[in-house]
Amino acid sequence: MTRPPDAPLFRFAPAVRWVHGLAGVLVLVLIATAAVLYNSELQVLVGHRPVVEAVHVWTGFALPVPVLAGLAFRSVRADVAELDRFTARDWQWLRSRTRRDGTIAVGKFNAGQKLNGSLSAGAGAVLLTTGAVMYLTDLTPLAWRTGATLVHDWTALAFGLLVVGHLYHALRDPTAMRGMRTGTVPLWWARHEHAAWAAELAGPAEPPARR
């Protein structure tokens, strides 16, 4: 069966979209509860600090669940492997000042998305580990909890800035956001933003007709 030339490309499987959505909701809950716990004015406004703290702790422990469950699906494993693979073209993309003009043909994910994925995974692991040390007061010495608190706070701040940057770039590209929501993207967008991936799925772009 011949593929229609302007048919949208399938970009994200349902399992990938569910993992991304659930993890995103949990991260937003963590950021909101952390803001209440660390800002005295918000604490007074919201109140119920023990409840907010409990929501924050158990949401943190729940964050790895959708990610680990998603690894049971081939589509999620394939995207994780792609995010973890840096190529010479990715380094070229990072060094380029005109990286977003489409002249560098990147794969399914550009180098910025790959870096975001790696940093997010690393920050999540650090936050989970330090959070567990802080929570298990009967099993960890005071010196560990003190050090874990410092690392947890600064990592949380860096991760929050990373999330803000991710949302900023997402809001600037409604087509990409729609692709995460529906699973498909227009061919023209794919050829501009991820030309190598588009060529792999739909073949190389036809040269413009000569007049």
Image: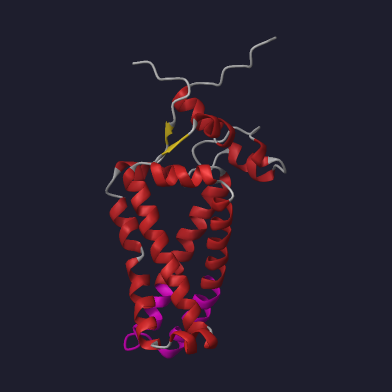
Judged left or right of residue 115, residue 29 is left
Residue 147 at least partly seen: no
The residue at the point 39 percent across, 76 percent down is 56
Magenta highlight on residue 55: no
Quadrant location of the N terminus?
Answer: top left
Relative to 25, residue 186 above or below: above
- Asked whether 125 or 35 is in front, the reply is 35
Residue 42 at least partly seen: yes
* Quarter where residue 95 is shown: top right
Start and end of the magenta stretch? 129-155
**Residue 53's x, y, as percent?**
39, 82
Judged left or right of residue 95, residue 61 is left
- Asked whether 90 or 8 is in front, the reply is 8
The residue at the point 65 percent across, 45 percent down is 94
Q: Residue furthest top?
A: 211
Q: Main secondary structure of the magenta part?
A: helix
* Quarter where residue 62 is shown: bottom left
Relative to 67, residue 132 above or below: below
